[in-house]
Image (cartoon, rainbow, N blue to C red):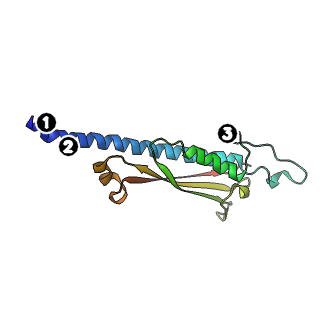
Amino acid sequence: MVEFALLAPIFLLLLFGIIVGGVVINAQVQLSNTVRDSVRAAAVCGDSATNLAYGSGATAPSMTLPSGSDCKDATVKAYITGLLGKIPGGGKVTSTAYSVYDSSNTLLGSTMDVCQKGDKIELSVTYSQPLFLPLIDRALGDSGGTNRTLKADAQATCEN
Protein backbone atom coordinates (compact mmCIF):
# COMPACT_ATOMS: atom_id res chain seq x y z
CA MET A 1 0.00 0.00 0.00
CA VAL A 2 2.83 2.40 0.81
CA GLU A 3 4.47 1.80 -2.56
CA PHE A 4 1.15 2.33 -4.33
CA ALA A 5 0.57 5.57 -2.38
CA LEU A 6 3.98 6.84 -3.46
CA LEU A 7 3.80 5.79 -7.11
CA ALA A 8 0.11 6.34 -7.92
CA PRO A 9 0.27 10.18 -8.06
CA ILE A 10 3.28 10.06 -10.36
CA PHE A 11 1.65 7.46 -12.58
CA LEU A 12 -1.64 9.41 -12.74
CA LEU A 13 0.18 12.65 -13.52
CA LEU A 14 2.02 10.91 -16.34
CA LEU A 15 -1.20 9.33 -17.63
CA PHE A 16 -3.14 12.61 -17.61
CA GLY A 17 -0.18 14.37 -19.22
CA ILE A 18 -0.29 11.89 -22.08
CA ILE A 19 -4.05 12.39 -22.46
CA VAL A 20 -3.81 16.20 -22.48
CA GLY A 21 -0.84 16.02 -24.86
CA GLY A 22 -2.97 13.89 -27.17
CA VAL A 23 -5.77 16.47 -27.06
CA VAL A 24 -3.29 19.25 -27.96
CA ILE A 25 -1.76 17.23 -30.81
CA ASN A 26 -5.24 16.36 -32.12
CA ALA A 27 -6.24 20.04 -32.02
CA GLN A 28 -3.06 21.01 -33.91
CA VAL A 29 -3.70 18.41 -36.61
CA GLN A 30 -7.35 19.46 -36.92
CA LEU A 31 -6.32 23.14 -37.07
CA SER A 32 -3.73 22.48 -39.79
CA ASN A 33 -6.20 20.43 -41.86
CA THR A 34 -8.96 23.01 -41.46
CA VAL A 35 -6.68 25.92 -42.44
CA ARG A 36 -5.40 23.99 -45.48
CA ASP A 37 -8.95 23.06 -46.58
CA SER A 38 -10.15 26.63 -46.00
CA VAL A 39 -7.42 28.29 -48.04
CA ARG A 40 -7.98 25.74 -50.81
CA ALA A 41 -11.70 26.56 -50.90
CA ALA A 42 -10.89 30.27 -51.04
CA ALA A 43 -8.35 29.75 -53.83
CA VAL A 44 -10.71 27.67 -55.94
CA CYS A 45 -13.54 30.09 -55.31
CA GLY A 46 -11.52 33.26 -55.90
CA ASP A 47 -13.65 36.23 -56.84
CA SER A 48 -15.39 35.09 -60.01
CA ALA A 49 -17.59 38.19 -60.12
CA THR A 50 -14.63 40.50 -60.78
CA ASN A 51 -12.31 38.11 -62.61
CA LEU A 52 -10.88 40.07 -65.54
CA ALA A 53 -9.68 36.99 -67.42
CA TYR A 54 -13.06 36.62 -69.11
CA GLY A 55 -12.83 39.94 -70.95
CA SER A 56 -15.52 42.54 -71.50
CA GLY A 57 -19.02 41.26 -72.13
CA ALA A 58 -18.19 37.73 -70.97
CA THR A 59 -19.49 36.40 -67.70
CA ALA A 60 -17.45 34.44 -65.26
CA PRO A 61 -18.74 30.98 -64.40
CA SER A 62 -20.92 30.74 -61.33
CA MET A 63 -18.71 29.56 -58.48
CA THR A 64 -19.92 28.45 -55.07
CA LEU A 65 -18.32 27.29 -51.85
CA PRO A 66 -18.82 23.69 -50.68
CA SER A 67 -21.50 25.09 -48.35
CA GLY A 68 -23.42 26.34 -51.42
CA SER A 69 -22.75 30.03 -50.69
CA ASP A 70 -21.66 32.51 -53.36
CA CYS A 71 -17.98 33.32 -53.81
CA LYS A 72 -17.84 36.73 -52.18
CA ASP A 73 -15.31 37.94 -49.64
CA ALA A 74 -17.77 37.98 -46.73
CA THR A 75 -19.22 34.53 -47.47
CA VAL A 76 -15.77 32.97 -47.94
CA LYS A 77 -14.62 34.40 -44.60
CA ALA A 78 -17.87 33.25 -42.93
CA TYR A 79 -17.38 29.77 -44.40
CA ILE A 80 -13.80 29.64 -43.07
CA THR A 81 -14.91 30.91 -39.65
CA GLY A 82 -17.55 28.17 -39.57
CA LEU A 83 -14.96 25.49 -40.34
CA LEU A 84 -12.60 26.82 -37.67
CA GLY A 85 -15.44 26.81 -35.13
CA LYS A 86 -15.86 23.05 -35.59
CA ILE A 87 -12.37 22.14 -34.38
CA PRO A 88 -12.81 19.78 -31.40
CA GLY A 89 -11.06 20.35 -28.10
CA GLY A 90 -12.83 23.34 -26.60
CA GLY A 91 -10.41 25.97 -27.87
CA LYS A 92 -11.09 29.20 -29.72
CA VAL A 93 -9.62 31.07 -32.64
CA THR A 94 -7.76 34.14 -31.38
CA SER A 95 -6.64 35.61 -34.72
CA THR A 96 -7.13 35.04 -38.43
CA ALA A 97 -5.09 36.81 -41.11
CA TYR A 98 -5.80 36.67 -44.85
CA SER A 99 -3.21 37.85 -47.39
CA VAL A 100 -3.17 37.82 -51.19
CA TYR A 101 0.15 38.10 -53.06
CA ASP A 102 0.89 38.41 -56.76
CA SER A 103 3.56 36.37 -58.58
CA SER A 104 6.34 38.71 -57.38
CA ASN A 105 5.22 38.30 -53.73
CA THR A 106 3.81 41.82 -53.53
CA LEU A 107 0.97 42.07 -51.02
CA LEU A 108 -2.23 42.90 -52.89
CA GLY A 109 -4.63 42.97 -49.95
CA SER A 110 -6.50 40.97 -47.36
CA THR A 111 -9.76 40.30 -49.21
CA MET A 112 -10.68 37.64 -51.73
CA ASP A 113 -11.80 40.41 -54.11
CA VAL A 114 -8.19 40.96 -55.20
CA CYS A 115 -7.44 37.26 -55.76
CA GLN A 116 -6.93 36.76 -59.50
CA LYS A 117 -5.79 33.64 -61.31
CA GLY A 118 -2.14 32.89 -60.46
CA ASP A 119 -2.04 34.99 -57.27
CA LYS A 120 -1.29 33.32 -53.96
CA ILE A 121 -3.69 33.44 -51.05
CA GLU A 122 -2.41 32.80 -47.54
CA LEU A 123 -4.30 32.13 -44.33
CA SER A 124 -2.70 32.27 -40.87
CA VAL A 125 -4.69 31.23 -37.80
CA THR A 126 -3.85 31.34 -34.10
CA TYR A 127 -5.84 29.05 -31.83
CA SER A 128 -5.94 28.94 -28.03
CA GLN A 129 -6.28 25.38 -26.69
CA PRO A 130 -7.21 24.96 -23.00
CA LEU A 131 -5.22 22.31 -21.13
CA PHE A 132 -7.90 21.45 -18.53
CA LEU A 133 -5.67 20.18 -15.68
CA PRO A 134 -3.84 22.46 -13.22
CA LEU A 135 -0.55 20.56 -12.96
CA ILE A 136 -0.42 19.70 -16.66
CA ASP A 137 -1.04 23.27 -17.82
CA ARG A 138 2.02 24.48 -15.91
CA ALA A 139 4.17 22.07 -17.91
CA LEU A 140 2.52 22.42 -21.35
CA GLY A 141 0.90 25.87 -21.16
CA ASP A 142 2.28 29.08 -22.60
CA SER A 143 4.46 30.67 -19.88
CA GLY A 144 2.86 28.44 -17.27
CA GLY A 145 -0.65 29.54 -18.27
CA THR A 146 -3.76 27.42 -18.68
CA ASN A 147 -3.78 27.54 -22.50
CA ARG A 148 -1.48 26.42 -25.28
CA THR A 149 -1.31 28.64 -28.39
CA LEU A 150 -1.42 26.68 -31.64
CA LYS A 151 -0.66 28.21 -35.04
CA ALA A 152 -1.27 27.06 -38.60
CA ASP A 153 -0.51 28.65 -41.97
CA ALA A 154 -1.48 27.54 -45.43
CA GLN A 155 -1.06 28.93 -48.92
CA ALA A 156 -2.74 28.16 -52.23
CA THR A 157 -2.76 29.55 -55.75
CA CYS A 158 -5.93 31.36 -56.83
CA GLU A 159 -7.61 29.53 -59.66
CA ASN A 160 -10.33 31.99 -60.64
Q: Amino acid at mark 1?
A: Phe
In the rendered image, the residue lying farthest to the top is: 1
Name the secondary structure under disc 2: helix
Taking the spot 73% from the left edge, 52% from the top edge, the residue there is 117
In the rendered image, the residue lying farthest to the right is: 57
Q: Amino acid at mark 2?
A: Ile
Q: Which mark is first along the chain, 2 or 3?
A: 2
Name the spot of residue 103 as percent of width and height, x first. 68, 60
Which residue is at the front of the view, 3 or 44?
3
* Residue 69, quarter of picture: top right
Which residue is at the front of the view, 118 or 31?
31
Name the spot of residue 125 as percent of width and height, x first. 53, 54
Label 1 Cα neighbours within 10 Å, binned few <14 / some 14-19 / many ≥20: few
Judge from the rendering whether residue 58 lies leftward or rightward of residue 78; answer left or right: right
Distance (Cα) linking label 3 and label 2: 48 Å
Taking the spot 82% from the left edge, 47% from the top edge, the residue there is 60
Name the spot of residue 38 as percent of width and height, x first. 60, 46
Which residue is labeled 2 in the image?
Answer: 10
Label 2 Cα neighbours within 10 Å, binned few <14 / some 14-19 / many ≥20: few
Name the spot of residue 106 as percent of width and height, x first. 66, 65
Which residue is labeled 1 in the image?
Answer: 4
Which residue is labeled 3 in the image?
Answer: 67
